[in-house]
Image: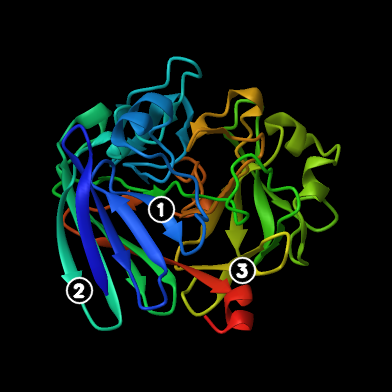
Amino acid sequence: MQITEQAFGQDYHLITIKNEDGFHLAVTDLGARIVRLGRDKELILGFDSAEEYLEKDPFIGGTIGRTAGRIENGRFTLDDQEYQVAVDPATGHSLHGGKPGFEAKKWDYTIENGDDEASIIFTTVSPDGEHGFPGNLTVEVRHTLTDENVWRVTTKGISDQTTLFNPTNHVYFNLTGDVTQAIDDHTLWLNSESFASLRPDTTPTGEITAAAGTPFDFQTEKPLADVFTSDFEQKNQCNGLDHPFFLKESHLHQPAAKLTSPDGNIELTVSTDSSSVVIFTANFGEDGPEIHGEKLAHHGGITFETQIAPGAEQFPEFGSITLPANETFETTTEYKITLKEAKKHGN
């Protein structure tokens, strides 16, 4: 595996792994984030420098924590003690663990190279009381690229006090490689029969809703345009998808999602040991940023944010995001890219 390091601006670094097939994964110590993924074209959204992430959108591709998603009013209870954490002034709810969060930290990193795969291992410490969360939390995020074109993300955390921990990676895919093209003609399959309904401010109501008979049913593969053109109330609230979907199985040997490019030549398969995945379809309207000098289209990307469903701190049926003191949390997600066109050409 070939590994290169280069400057990424503002004293941050870009580390790129390339396998024998020429497929590459690039990550940076700004937010332990993924920046690039692909071979002949980039299959994810990403900027060209650290400055652009900090100025335009620090969440794209970033490691999110301590808690991905929203905590209603920024309040929760642990061991009979109530906590008030930092909230987003625009909504009054905690968002992605508070700003600046994991996505804006400069992470330490080491490199491991092997015959069949290579990894960049990022580490950081979130100190006790950061944004109001208890405990000194040590976090490790390992980004791995394999010879089989699998990008694997493994996240670990351990705290010296009981705390909340629900990390994810905020990657956006667009398998056309063209950020000016919406993802309407991508087809999606999900191993899910239910989702969390949201209020207009995108906090969960606590209701687990059956997907069958709604535009949010992806148990049979279908174009995302079927959702965008629907008049479904949950779609209208967000102008797209911004919802947690509960997975029927949660292990790395069972696909959780499959996304296929409009021409059918590129397939993304997501597998995870997380119990849910938040699907967000870049519902930015005209407010999307410029990426590589091009304006991001409305619905110009789709996320697969594997995690425990946001709202679990108040709705136990969603799962648990409580991390007991001195216990290690670990979660792994794999994103496998199949390049069907490449196989036809013998490359």
For disc 3, the marked residue is: 267
At x 37% / y 41%, what residue is drawn? 67
Residue closer to the observer: 222 or 139:
222
Q: Mark 2 highlights which residue?
A: 113
Circle 3 residues within 10 Å: few <14, some 14–19, many ≥20: many
For discs 1 and 3, the disc positioned in front in the rendered view: 1
Type of the residue with mark 1: Arg
Estimate the spatial distance between the alpha carbons at disc 3 and disc 2, rounded to whole Å.
Answer: 26 Å
Find disc 1 in the rendering and name its residue.
Answer: 36
Q: Residue at x 32, y 37 (%)?
A: 49
Q: Is residue 135 visible?
A: yes
Choose top left, top right, bottom left or bottom right for residue 282: top right
Q: Amino acid at mark 3?
A: Glu
Q: Say what secondary structure mark 3 lies in.
A: strand
- Percent across and percent down for residue 117 are 29, 76
In the image, residue 84 sits, relative to residue 137, either above or below, namely: above
Residue 221 image offset from top left, x and y in percent: 76, 65
* 109 and 289: which is toward the camera: 289
